[in-house]
Structures are given as structure tokens and as C-alpha cells.
Image (cartoon, rainbow, N blue to C red):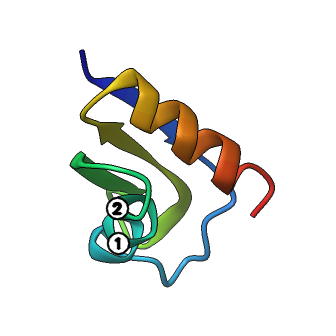
Amino acid sequence: MEKRLFVGNLPYTMSEGDLETAFGEYGQVVSAVVIRDRDTGRSRGFGFVEMETEAEAEAAMGAMDGF
């Protein structure tokens, strides 16, 4: 079962590819989305990552917490 994670405090320069690469170290990333302002297109500093399994999501959360 897939697990969706909220990722906050992202640098405004981070792309979906950067986010996928960072979390890809801990398992299979199904999707990575950086939320953007609809008017300016600039990152809002948070996003979501969907991991393939619950175990991979737990490993990513433990490793990336506070990073």
C-alpha cells in the first residue's frame, strides 16, 4: 500500500526531480510534487512524496526528519 508524506521547509529552488532523488535513497518513489503558487509559479516551500510501501515511507521519514 502506498504512503503519502508531507514534506515541509523545502528551499524555493527545489524541483520535483530533486525531491524524488532525495527520497529515492530510501525506496521506490511513486510521485513527488512541489506545491507552487498558482499566480507566480514559485514554490510555496512544501510538497508531497508518495512511497511504494509503508516500510519505505517509515525509513524515509526517520532519515529525513529534521534534515
Vertical placement of residue 39 versus 4, above or below: below
Would you say 35 lies left or right of 46 here? left
Instruction: Check the picture and name the quadrant holding the N terminus.
Output: top left
- The mark tally for this picture is 2
Whole-percent x and y of residue 49? 37, 45
Q: Position of residue 5 (x, y in %)?
A: 48, 34
Task: Tell which of 51 and 37 is nearer to you.
Answer: 51
Q: Residues within 10 Å of mark 2 (few under 14, many from 20)?
A: some
- For label 1, the crowd category at 10 Å Cα-Cα, with few meaning under 14, some 14 to 19 and many 20 or more, is few
Against 1, residue 10 (above or below) is below
Residue name at image x 21 percent, y 47 percent: 31
Q: Are marks 1 and 2 in contact (CB under 8 Å)?
A: yes
**Residue 50 drawn above or below residue 19:** above
Q: CA distance from mark 1 to mark 2?
A: 5 Å
Classify mark 1: helix, strand or loop.
Answer: helix
- Identify which amino acid the numbered label 2 is placed on: Gly
The residue labelled by disc 2 is 24
Instruction: Please provide percent x and percent y for residue 46.
Output: 54, 53
Residue identifier under label 1: 21
Residue 13 visible in the snapshot: yes
